[in-house]
Image (cartoon, grey):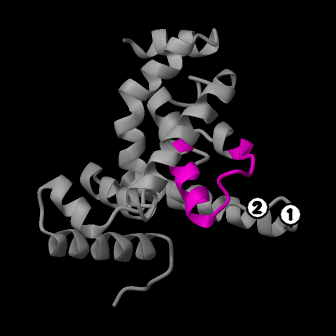
Amino acid sequence: MKETELIQLLTARDERGAEELLRHYAPLIRYVASPILADERSVEECVSDVAMRVWENIGRYDPEKGGFKAWLTAIARNAALNTARGESRRPQTEDIDAGPEEDSPAAGIAAPAEADPAEALLRKERAAALESALNRLGSTDRSIFYRRYYYKQSLAQIGAELGMSERAAEGRLYRIRKQLRKELGGEHDE
């Protein structure tokens, strides 16, 4: 089934949409949730939670902000993090609205609503600088960074999936962090 057909079924509140969502995307949701959650039972609860969130909020999906998979992945990641923190039952509208830009490692330094305007501006500038630096990384390095810090994957998993040893993934991640610190002004030439 095509993604557009799935979205149409979900939007029309056709139960086949929920079935197709789970059939096609449950493995992706498990993949995202597994490194974050401690046990298989929690992962399965997260899959159900994500399916429910998608069902309830499909009208908020905006293809202009990013692809369906990116939206679904952001929901899965945030649901897993909330489950890990014991907050899975709290409404999370910000998770649903977050597109790839708003829900990235750089967005993690965004200012809380109650921060003073100068601090909010500074955080926004830092987030933009980090996002820009991440975009300048090669695709493999960017993938390693996101897998480790956004998707919370272990170095062993990253190495295995990218065809390198755990030690090689660790070394590469060290060099990536060092490069980012230097680019962002956190480290001077040695």
Residue 61 seen by the camera = no
Q: x, y percentage for residue 27?
A: 34, 38
Q: Residue furthest front?
A: 41
Question: 25 or 122: which is nearer to us?
Answer: 25
The amino acid at mark 1 is Pro
Question: 132 or 63: which is nearer to us?
Answer: 63
Q: Which residues are magenta?
A: 75-94
The amino acid at mark 2 is Leu
63 relative position to 90: left or right: left
**Residue at figure coordinates x 61%, y 57% from the top left:** 82
Q: Are marks 1 and 2 in contact (CB under 8 Å)?
A: yes
- Assess whether residue 180 is covered by the magenta stretch: no
Q: Is residue 113 above or below residue 8?
A: below
Question: 139 or 169: which is nearer to us?
Answer: 169
Q: Characterize the local packing of mark 2: few (<14), some (14-19) or many (20 or more) Cα atoms within 10 angstroms.
A: some
**Residue at figure coordinates x 30%, y 70% from the top left:** 173
Q: Which residue is mark 2?
A: 121
Q: Quadrant of the N terminus?
A: top left
Element under label 1?
helix
**Magenta region, mostly helix, strand or loop?**
helix
37 relative position to 138: left or right: right
Q: Residue furthest bottom?
A: 190
Mark seen at residue 117: 1
